Image: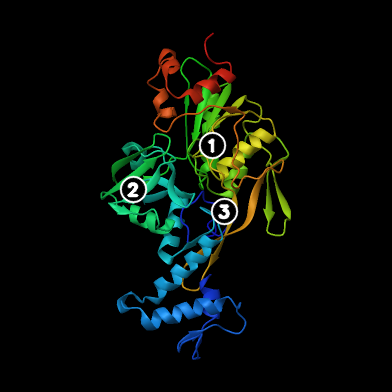
Amino acid sequence: MKQFLRIMVIAIFFLSFTAAVFGAGVALGGSGVLFEPGIRAGKDQPTEFATFWQAWNLVQRHFIDRQSLDNTKLTYGAIQGMINALGDEGHTIFLTPEELKQQQTEISGTFSGIGAQVGVKDSLSVIVSPFDGSPAEKAGVKAGDIIMEVDGEDVTSWPLNEVVNHIRGKAGTVVILTLFRSDENKSVKISITRGEIKVPTATWGMVPGTKVALIRLSQFNVNATQEMVKALNESKTAGATSLIVDLRNNPGGLLEQAVNVTSQFLKDGNVLQQENYDGNRQSFAVKSGGVATDIPLVVLINRGTASASEIFSGAIQDHQRGRVVGEKTFGTGTVLEPFILKDGSGLMLGTSQWLTANGRLIRKQGIKPDVEVELSIGKELLTPAKLKDLKMADLLKNEDTQILKALELLKALPK
């Protein structure tokens, strides 16, 4: 719980007026033309609340379906509406008590579902990234897929938390997603059997015929630094003299882990800056003792690279530590501070935003690669596990042109 209460960002799990604020404006009694008998706003509340309480009382008195008058659901709906109106899509979120518990489980690296990070873009729920080896990835779900239907229900007008709740379920059960792929201008229907998801944090492998190690970091969860250091040390022992760090489809995670992982590659300076609502900035310095501060490096990014991954790639660029290859990242960067409400629900409120070490804004801007190499959604990413079965001749024919470009920049391809 202590880890969860730290300032964190999560490239976007749910979108969802806090209960404390809501409750503070409640008083019984009152009558008149504007407020029918029932609940009215307190004297210390904004005058705009008058319209809200008028609508609340009209619903309570006149709505035909009396069984639908669930005050908890109505309250949560009002909170979600307020959060949506902030326009901080995919970042600031409201969580019911059940969703709050689920999120605590997910950030630990183990949970049940399809194994995909879901966010919001242009008011639509989209797949930010499927996790490596997850049921979603195995079924063919791709980063950038727009979620149109869940089990035959149109979800394009639903808030993100409702979409996620319908996708989730017990391991072994099936969910059917209808997804739209804008790059291919087509819809696909995919059946996915849910499973117990353990997010693999860091994996690595030697690129055949080279002295280059490919390290894939899938998420900045609580184990990220430990696993990254382990992968770096093992790859160097295996003879690696240069590195490719693959952050493609990495949805981010914890700020502390972003700083610690990035510090493994930098000697000094700052990893990032954090700016609050008053415009005041705080710098997060590189931590000493990095184990890979000199080895040649290329970082891979794409549209599924988000949050803490953008901090990492932005720091590598600003320090000119290595080249960044691929596609423009997702563009998240709100620092979410958790506030636990009276009924056990939570508000993850964007109280600050992240900038790179040199002051470049990440939120809604993303990180642009030094070398742009587009890879269509249908193309398979080459992972460390897949390297074991390849020879150099096979590698040169591989459709993952982003890795090939990284190898070219590291001068590791045959002439």
Of the numbered discs in the image, which one, if any, rests on residue 8? 3
Which one is closest to the eye, mark 1 or mark 3? 3
Q: In the rendered structure, are the residues bearing label 3 and label 2 in contact, judged by CB atoms less than 8 Å apart?
A: no
Residue at the extreme top of the image, as rendered: 415
- Residue 333 location, x and y as percent? 59, 48
Q: 248 or 112, which lies in front? A: 248
Residue 360 left/right relative to 395: right
Q: Which residue is mark 1?
A: 228
What colouring style does the render use? rainbow
Q: Which residue is mark 2?
A: 196
Q: Quadrant of residue 138?
A: top left
Residue 300 left/right relative to 97: right
Residue at 49% x, 49% y: name it: 122
Which one is closest to the eye, mark 1 or mark 2? 2
Say what amino acid the circle numbered 1 marks: Met
Say what amino acid the circle numbered 3 marks: Met
Say what amino acid the circle numbered 2 marks: Glu
Label 2 element class = strand
Residue 395 left/right relative to 331: left
Instruction: Inspect this view and state whether residue 88 appears.
Output: yes
Residue at 38% x, 84% y: name it: 61
Q: CA distance from mark 1 to mark 2?
A: 23 Å
Label 1 element class = helix
Name the image quarter holding the C terminus. Answer: top right
- Residue 399 location, x and y as percent? 42, 22
Q: Earlier in the sequence, mark 3 or mark 2?
A: 3
